[in-house]
Amino acid sequence: MNAPSPVTAHPESHDEVESLCAVLHRFGARLSPRTIDTDGRIPPPVLDELKGMGLLGLTIPEAYGGAGLGLQAACRVAATLARYDRSVATTAGLHMGLGTRGLVAYGSGALKERVLPRLATGTLGAFAATESNAGSDLTAVATKAMLDQDRLLVDGAKIYVTNGGLAGVFTLLVSTPWATGGRRAQSLLLLERTDHGLEVGAEEKKLGLRGSSTTSLFATGVEVSPDRIIGEPGTGARQASHVLSWGRTVMASGCLGSAGAALDAALRHVTTRKQFGRTLAQLDVVREQVADMAATHFAMEALIQDTAASVTDEELLARSLGAKVVCSEGGWQIGDTALQLHGGSGFIEDTGLALVLRDLRITRIFEGANDVLLVHAGTLAVTTGMPVTDPALDGLPEDLRAHHQTLRQRFSTHLAEVKLRHGVRLLGDQRRLHRIGRLATLRASCDAAVRRAASEGTSLALAHAAHWLQLSAQQQARWLDEPAPKDTVSAIAEAHYGRVTP
Ligand SMILES: Cc1cc2nc3c(=O)[nH]c(=O)nc-3n(C[C@H](O)[C@H](O)[C@H](O)COP(=O)(O)OP(=O)(O)OC[C@H]3O[C@@H](n4cnc5c(N)ncnc54)[C@H](O)[C@@H]3O)c2cc1C
């Protein structure tokens, strides 16, 4: 059996990543996001250039032709690319995340030897878990890989496969009821585009990310050798959890990049646009919105840094839930505020913000719908307390430290009270778990923001962290409040459900 790989391949080479990002900034500045959006595809020479830069091999071990870097590097790259074009960032990010992580972390030496050198140099990877009846609930996956003597027979249909139209290698989550774990056992399986019986569907038409390929994938009597199973048969659910934690962290970094671009666009606009005889930037309400955007961006970046530095799988899972929710929602808020500050021009495609928002919208849904992740985060907080480390706060001003402690204390007290009051029933109370998930992700973002401020030590970093705590306190008050009475909520919902005939 393969031991799970450590979360990070080896300590990141800061210089190596920074010089790559400098190249990517020049590359990104030459992209035409509007053309990519309108054409619904990334021009092949752009993909070739990415491959030529060695980007596909960034997170693939050196032994297989890659650069052997880890999650921190993948996050920096995804954030950098997303500043310029989210479809390009998604195509590359998916490859570095979901598309290759399963094989890198769990594949046998022989399988890696056979496939990773190609994935490191020119072949794109994709990850196919979702099916028409298995979305948020991946335990319902119906695609089966059945053992037939010395062959595996694969049948089923996957939907919404990012990179589907471009990839040469697919990691599938499949049902393997013959494996350890029995009827519900799942495994990760590697299929190649050239496998007989594997077909890629047509490109989906989407609200955003139009340059990124999204297709179905059909396996009809695909016959492959059992050594295509990644790692131990029957351990697919656990492996998928790791792969998704990794992938959603890379995706959350893309939100950071999009948000950074939107913030910069807003800054350029408000400092030049004049109304009422002065620039918008001089208006107090605008200043506050800019401060909100900047503090949110600061906290998003801090949370990504914390998540990408996770040491254990448990840490990565717990932190990635918060990073994904905070960054997808923060990205959306920053994009939305940037558009609002542009006034009518923000609504016009040429400004570019409409595209940023359209591209951002899916990030609250894919790689785990946010509400599902929040319930998960709430469950973790109730059952394990989530792996929380106290941030080192040396050098922080007393008021910032005290505010941070107050927010943490309020959450701990609330969690203890709710657990005492509801006991084991809490684990069946989805709405309370969802609220606890909200509170837990807020706490993680506050911890990350103060940790970052303490380490940077500048007055601007301290101001960002203080402002984020202020915004978080408002949010926290909302989620500490009792939920609306269940009877009322159910009565309203049921009445409306009754108005529609399925
Ligand atoms: C552009 C795009 C790219 C994608 N790329 C990939 C990919 O590469 N690989 C892949 O495997 N999948 C991919 N997906 C699929 C994506 O991950 C799923 O769409 C997502 O996980 C949600 O599943 P679903 O669409 O079936 O929604 P459902 O599971 O039907 O959920 C719909 C909504 O119901 C609510 N909900 C559901 N369950 C709960 C719950 N337990 N608690 C609270 N609320 C709940 C949420 O609001 C949720 O958004 C992609 C999707 C899109 C649109």
Image (cartoon, rainbow, N blue to C red):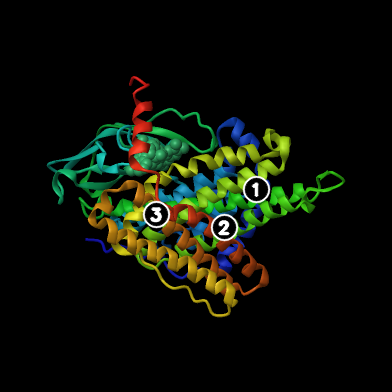
The three-letter amino acid code for the residue at tag 1 is Ala
The quarter of the picture where the N terminus appears is bottom left
Check disc 2 and report its element: helix, strand or loop: helix
Residue mark closest to the camera, 1 vs 3: 3
Q: Is residue 202 left or right of residue 210?
A: left
Q: Residue at x 56, y 49 (%)?
A: 331
Residue density around tag 1, few if under 14, some if 14–19, many if 20 or more, within 10 Å: many
Q: Which residue is label 2 attached to?
A: 471
Q: Which mark is residue 437?
A: 3
Is disc 3's CB within 8 Å of ligand 1? no
Q: Position of residue 256 (x, y in %)?
A: 56, 53
Q: Are marks 1 and 2 in contact (CB under 8 Å)?
A: no
Q: Residue at x 68, y 48 (%)?
A: 29
Check disc 1 and report its element: helix, strand or loop: helix
Give the residue furthest to the top: 501
Q: Are marks 2 and 3 in contact (CB under 8 Å)?
A: no
- The quadrant holding residue 338 is top right
Visible residue check, residue 171 = no
Alpha carbon separation for disc pair 2 and 3: 17 Å
Instruction: Decide: is 254 above or below 359.
Output: below
Q: Residue at x 33, y 21 (%)?
A: 502
